[in-house]
Amino acid sequence: MGMTIVEKILAQHAGLESVKPGQLIEARVDHVLANDITAPIAIKQFNNAGAKKVFDRERIILVPDHFAPNKDIASAEQCKILRDFSRKHDLTHYFEVGRMGVEHALLPEQGIILPGEIIIGADSHTCTHGALGAFATGVGSTDVAAAMITGELWFKVPETIKFVFSGKLNTWVTGKDIILYTIGDIGVDGALYKAMEFTGNVTDSLSVEARLTIANMAIEAGAKCGIFKPDEKTFNYLKERSDSAYTPCYSDEDAGYVETREYNVENIEPQVAFPHSPDNTRPISEVGNIPVQQSVIGSCTNGRIEDLRVAAEVLKGRKTNRDVRLIIIPATQKIYRQAMEEGLLEIFLEAEAAVSTPTCGPCLGGHMGILAKGEASIATTNRNFVGRMGHPESSVYLSNPAVAAASAVLGRIASPEEL
């Protein structure tokens, strides 16, 4: 029996001819990622282990993005730990405020992640990078410390579920809706410690940005990773960003899958995930009348230029409802500049939105959009757990950027078709 793309990547990095699900392996890693919440813990363990240097200064990536720009003294101290460690070890990839972005949007944009690689990150949404044909997964901070020292980590080879999407996407339906619909179907534990391999004519037609959105939320189904086969769109995307060599991997025709699930996307409307779980999804036609006090467009899920263009299309010539705070956060400095050059920021400001410098901010209830008791927010972020964006008695609804923009205008969760 052949191997899946994930199994091939793991086998190559473990120096083995083949691997099978459930097998424990030790594999070299290509990149180690951490942020201002998780890196300080890893750095403490790095120092406690008596390590004097990192395994490769060009393969450690530190991004202060969760509470950055620093919102208080505590967050300033956290970020200082990253800054000091990066200077001490002369890390190539440390991204300071003004040059940084939300980590899982920044790394692909910088051309750091390549097909066939292994990237681990002390952040669960590291699975985003599987959109480029890499094995990318979140790990604990102590695992990051070990990998920073040795350049290796142990893994249990996951089983793979194959998701096949066919048909033609309906108007206003995006990658966000595909993944929300899928999670709603299989549940938040439907792919527990499994790889989600996304295939079919629909995924082939999607932009790299849309694929990044889908892979980003694989963790919301409990998956170890989400992954796409690299194709010409992948190669063209990387050609503009990197001149490094890489070796893409592909699943064999006789690869073994624990399950194959097929979806006709013509049955998918824009989706909304209700509180307090990403799998509590409903089509927009069944949402009902739900007022919102805040709309957030951004995050590592939907803060890319493609997302901002869709939001601008809906908001152009319109105003945010007087009872709603519309917060728009471009995911990186480059995206911010591109949005400015394309006139998108002018549209947002005319719509009376607040436009922020890149930050995770409100996604994790950090800053730049905390909810008060009883308030509700529509958001293009990836999680809507209890208290995720603020007060434990607030509510977060997840959607694509078009729905979030239309909701900001109408003051309730709404389809852009209504405008």
Image (cartoon, grey):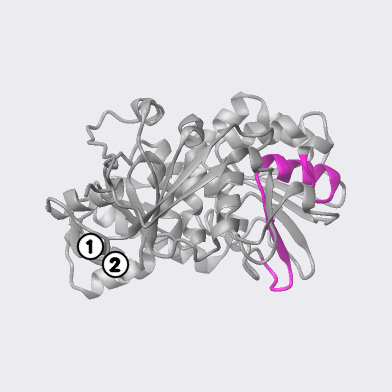
Q: Is residue 403 magenta?
A: yes
- Could you tell me which residue is drawn at 86 percent across and 55 percent down? 289
Left/right placement of residue 17 relative to residue 342 reads left
- Could you tell me which residue is drawn at 80 percent across and 46 percent down? 414
Residue 62 in the image: x percent, y percent?
36, 53
Q: Are marks 2 and 1 in contact (CB under 8 Å)?
A: yes
Q: Which segment is the magenta one?
A: 390-415
Q: In this orientation, does residue 90 appear? A: no
For the residue marked with disc 1, what is the amino acid? Leu
Left/right placement of residue 168 relative to residue 231 reads right
Q: Is residue 144 above or below residue 134?
A: below
Image quadrant for the C terminus? top right
* Image mark for residue 81: none
The secondary element bearing badge 2 is classed as: helix
Q: Is residue 123 above or below residue 410?
A: below
Residue 24: name its quadrant: bottom left
